[in-house]
Amino acid sequence: MTRPQLSEERYGPSPSLPAESSLINLFRLLPESSRPLIEFHEILLRGPSPFTEGEREMIASYVSGLNRCRYCSGVHVATAELLGIPKTSVESAILDSDTAQISEKMKPVLRYAQKLTLHPHSLEQSDADAILAAGWDEVALFHTVAVASLFNFMNRLVEGMGIELDVQYVKPASERLAKSGYLPLIAMLSK
């Protein structure tokens, strides 16, 4: 599906977003709702968790890959890689989480995230039980659901507002997220 062109210099449904906008441009339009969203990212992806920061970024990039959100997938695959997750792990998981080059312990987590993303009505108790049987606890189950849900939301926000990936943006964005987390985005709201 192609996005409707509003003018030579703008695209997508919002004429307030110039072509080649990043997510920060969208956040600046609505700082009141963006600030708590950024804070939630920080808590969920950088706060205490049974998962490492890299594993949470892997879940985020996996969901974004399933949704074919090039923007979020590009930034978060690179961030996961900077946090110790091989790029090939995410890419192989998107193709087939059962044969992916990831730890056996992460496979039921990604299977759960996949079902929640593509067929949420098909989730069963056995899907949650598989995460617990792999050695994770209920907090890990919550984090699986929360990260997958957050990135399903973010993918739809990005796609719905017509934000496209600028490959030049990936390196500085992923380095900032890997090194400093999400809170620095709040300071960028007023720039």
Image: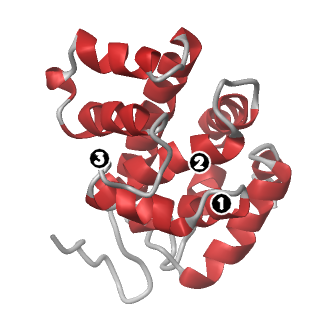
Give the mark nearer the N terminus: 2 vs 3. Answer: 2
Give the number of the mark in front: 2 or 3.
Answer: 3
* For the residues bearing labels 2 and 1, Cβ distance under 8 angstroms: yes
Residue drawn at 66 percent across, 37 percent down: 45
Residue type for callout 3: Asp
Q: Could you say which quadrant of the image residue 114 lies in?
A: top left
Q: Where is residue 10 in the image (x, y as percent from the top left)?
A: 42, 78
Residue type for callout 2: Glu
Dot 2: what SS? Answer: helix
| Residue identified by numbered label 1 | 79
Label 3, residues with CA under 10 Å away: few <14, some 14-19, many ≥20: some
Residue drawn at 67 percent across, 39 percent down: 38
Give the mark nearer the N terminus: 3 vs 1. Answer: 1
Q: Which mark is residue 107?
A: none
| Residue identified by numbered label 3 | 98
Label 2, residues with CA under 10 Å away: few <14, some 14-19, many ≥20: many
Rounded to the nearest angstrom, the CA distance separating label 3 from label 1 is 23 Å
Q: Could you say which quadrant of the image residue 151 lies in?
A: top left
Rounded to the nearest angstrom, the CA distance separating label 2 from label 1 is 7 Å
**Is 17 left, or right, of 4 in this rendering?**
right
| Residue identified by numbered label 2 | 57
Q: Where is residue 26 in the image (x, y as percent from the top left)?
A: 56, 56
